[in-house]
Amino acid sequence: MWLSWAAYWWLLSKRVKTTVQREPVGRRLSHIVPLVFAVFLLWIPHLPVPVLGDRLYPWAPWSFWLGAFVTAAGLLFAVWARVHIGANWSGIVTIKEGHDLIMTGPYALVRHPIYTGLSLGFIGSAIARGEWRGVLAAVIVVVSFWFKLRFEERWMRQQFGAAYDIYSQRVSALIPLRL
């Protein structure tokens, strides 16, 4: 699933608007490095830290399939958001030429549906793996996306002003519920 998602993501990355402003390299690395580490934690066959490879629960087909379902749901949600945002998308925090504030489709449910979907994908993969390293990887991903979205939201507020403030009061950042 992840390889199919990555191939699709890469193909769509060619159809975007021209970038006007992009986050600094150091800032970009602050969320890319943790994500790469989380991928490493989940997908390397054996880890040198034994406790991270300990099982959370005994392996069973249901846990694998539950994890696969959650992963698929998360990746599909991210794809829906990626298609919906269209040419405004970027893998890093940017402002595009003629940048639009998208508030429909998955963006009516959460302000950062790609982060939500990818977080769910990692959580699903962690469930399927069933080891402590999956928990650590999922936490790293969610925290990394949280810091990235905080930075991104500053730029969105600068770009869209009161419209973004109203949108952010109406729609939550990552979880489609107002608690």
Image (cartoon, rainbow, N blue to C red):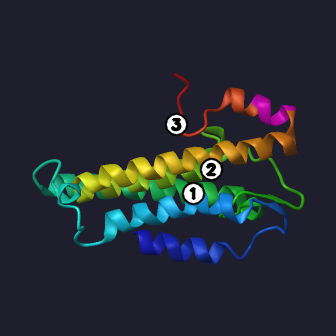
Q: Secondary structure at mark 3?
A: loop
Q: Would you call the spot at circle 2 few (<14 residues within 10 Å), some (14-19), or many (20 or more)? A: some
Assess whether mark 1 and mark 3 are in contact (beta carbons under 8 angstroms).
no
The mark closer to the camera, 3 or 2, is 2
* Residue 36 percent location from the top left of the image: 47, 66
Q: From the viewer's perspective, tell me whether residue 81 is left or right of residue 130.
A: right
Q: Earlier in the sequence, mark 3 or mark 1?
A: 1
Residue at left offset 78%, top offset 31% = 165
Assess whether mark 1 and mark 2 are in contact (beta carbons under 8 angstroms).
yes
The mark closer to the camera, 3 or 1, is 1
User: Label 2, on which residue?
Assistant: 148
Q: CA distance from mark 3 to mark 2?
A: 16 Å
Residue 94 image-quadrant placement: bottom right
- The amino acid pointed to by label 1 is His
Q: CA distance from mark 3 to mark 1?
A: 20 Å
Is 164 contained in the magenta span?
yes
Q: From the viewer's perspective, tell me whether residue 118 is left or right of residue 85.
A: left
- The amino acid pointed to by label 3 is Ile
The quarter of the rendered structure image containing the N terminus is bottom left
- The amino acid pointed to by label 2 is Lys
Q: Earlier in the sequence, mark 2 or mark 1?
A: 1
Assess whether mark 2 and mark 3 are in contact (beta carbons under 8 angstroms).
no
Q: From the viewer's perspective, tell me whether residue 64 is left or right of residue 88.
A: left
Is 24 contained in the magenta span?
no
* Residue 87 percent location from the top left of the image: 76, 64
User: Label 3, on which residue?
Assistant: 175
* Residue 130 percent location from the top left of the image: 21, 54
Residue at left offset 52%, top offset 63% = 33
